[in-house]
Image (spheres, helix red, strand yellow):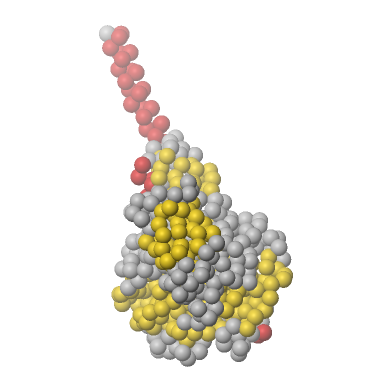
Amino acid sequence: MKDICSISYIALLSVGLAPVSAAFAQTPSIISVVPTANARAVARTGSITVTFSQPLTAASAASLKVFSQQRGGLRTAATSPAVVSGSTLSFAPASAPFTPGETIYYTVTTAAASSGGNLAQARVGQFTTAVGGAGRGTFLAGSDPNVGDYPLGGVLGDVDGDGDLDLLTVSVLLNTVSVRLNSGSGIFSGNQEIPVGFSPNGLVLGDVDGDGDLDLLTGNYTTSSTSGTVSVRLNNGSGIFSGNQEVLVSPNPGSVVVGDIDGDGDLDLLTANQSALNTVSVRLNNGSGTFGGSQNVAIAGNPVNLVVGDVDGDGDLDLLATSNNTGTVSVRLNNGSGTFAGTQDVGVGTNPTGLALGDIDGDDDLDLLNVSVGAGPRGIALSDLDSDGDLDLVVVGVTTPGVMSIRLNNGSGTFSGGYDSSIGNNMRGVVLGDVDGDGDLDLLAVSNTSPGVVSVRLNGGTNLASNSANPARSFTAFPNPSRTTASFSGTTSYAPVTLFDALGRTVLTTVADATGLARVSLPDGLPAGLYLASSAGHICRLVVE
C-alpha cells in the first residue's frame, strides 16, 4: 500500500510540473544578421544569414523574405526559398546574383519559431551590393531612346526575366508607363505603353504579389479634389503588365515607394501627396498585391518626395519626406506595425525636392541627402560610381541644356572631385544600374520633353557595342556573369571569337559581325566557372553561372 501511494504521488507531481515547464519556455530571439544592416559593398553572391538564440522549426524557412527591386522581385519565392540549419536561417542568391549596386531589403517575420514559440518582433533591414567592373565614374555619350511624352521619372529592372535591366518611364501627358527592353548591352527598344491612372507622377517597381517578378505602381494626381490613386499593374513574368487596381490615397500623390513597413513579409505602398492636406498615405498589402487601409501621416508641408529606411536602428522602416514649402525633411518613425509618429522636421535648403538615404560615412547608419530646386537640381542618386566600396553622388538639373554633376566620396562622407557635364534637357530624374552587364554602374537621365528622351551614359568608357559610329574601346563580354547566352564586343570586324575553359580547351568558336560584335548560345550543361574569350589578339574573361 505504501508503494502504491508513492507511485501515485510521483505521478501527480509530474503532471503538476508540465504546465510550469511550459510557462518558462523561451521564444527565439535574433542574435545577429549578416550582412549587417546598411552595409554598402556586400558580395553579389553572398548569403543572408540570420542567427537565432534557439534551433528553429523547419517551417521557419518561410519567415525570411528577401526583396530586390531590380531582378527577381521576391528572391525567396517558392523556387528558391530560405534554408533552416539548426539555429540559423539563410538565403543565398544561387539562381542569379544580386545586381551591382542595388539595395536589397529583407524581412524576418514572426513566423520564425522554435519549440518555445514564435519570434516576438519582426526584423526589417537593407544593404547595398558591391560594384565591380572597370568604370571609375566617367560617363561617355551613348544612346538616347525615346519614351512617352513628358516623362517625370524612370526606373530600371529586369521585367522580362532575361537577366538584364530594362527601362520604364512614366508619362504625365499620355497617362502611360513606357517599357523599353534591354538587348543586354544597354540598347533599349520596344514600344509597349501601359495604361495607368490620370496624370501619373511617381513610378516604382516591386514584387507586390510575391510571385518572383517585378510589378509596377504609379502615383496619379487624377481629376478629383478629394483623392488621388495608385495604379497597380501586375507582371506575368515576361514583361507584360495587366490589371486595373486603383488604390485610393490622398489628393495629388507624386512620389510612390514600396517597402515592408508592417513586417509581415510583403511590400506595402506609401505616397507623398502634394496637396494642402500635407500627408503621406500608407496602404498595406494583403500579400497578393491588393492594398487597403486609410492611414495618412501628417507632414510639415507639401511633401514632394519620399524615401523609407530604418533611420533609428530598431529594425523597421521609417519614412522621410521633403516638405517643399517649409524647407524641411519630415522624419516619421515606425512603431514596427506600420504606424508612424513623431514631429522631427530637419531643416535643409529652399524648396527641397530630390531625396536619398544611404550610409555615406561608413558607420552603418543611414544618412540623408537632398537637393533643392532653387539652384536647378532635381534628381539625385547615391551609389558606388567608381567601384571603391563607398556611395558616390550624382545630381541632374532642370536647366536647358541639362547638367549632371558627379561627386566622388572619400569614404567618410566628404564629396569632391568628379565633374559636371551637359546632358539632355529639363532633367527630372536619374537612375543608376549596370545596363551593359560589365559590372559597373551606368547612368540614365530622364528629360521632361516631347518626345520623351532618356540619356544612357555608360560608365568607364565602354560605349555601346552596336553603335558603329562610336565603337567599343576594348574586348568585352556581356552580360557578365552569363547563364545561357553571351555577347562579345570590341573585336575586329568579322574576326573569329573563341571561348576556352580554364584548362585551355576550346568550348566554341564564332565570328564577329561588321561592328565587331559576336553573340553566342552557351552549350547546354556548360559547367559554372571562369572562361576566357580570345579574338584578334585580345582576351577577356567570362563568368558562367
Q: Is residue 83 above or below residue 435?
A: above
What's the residue at 63%, 83% (across, down)? 422
Q: Is residue 307 above or below residue 273?
A: above
Q: Position of residue 419 (x, y in %)?
A: 68, 76
Number of disc labels: 0
Quadrant in which residue 1 is drawn: top left
Q: Position of residue 194 (x, y in %)?
A: 35, 80
In the drawing, does residue 280 fall left or right of residue 373? left
What's the residue at 66%, 56% (across, down)? 363
Residue 204 visible somewhere in the drawing = no
Q: Is residue 142 above or below residue 31?
A: below
Of 274 and 465, nearer the camera is 465
Q: Position of residue 99 (x, y in %)?
A: 49, 61
Q: Position of residue 338 (x, y in %)?
A: 46, 63
Of 56 and 376, nearer the camera is 376
What's the residue at 34%, 54% (across, down)? 524
What's the residue at 40%, 88% (across, down)? 174
Quadrant in which residue 171 is drawn: bottom left
Residue 502 visible somewhere in the drawing = yes
Of 79 and 289, nearer the camera is 79
Of 459 and 209, nearer the camera is 459
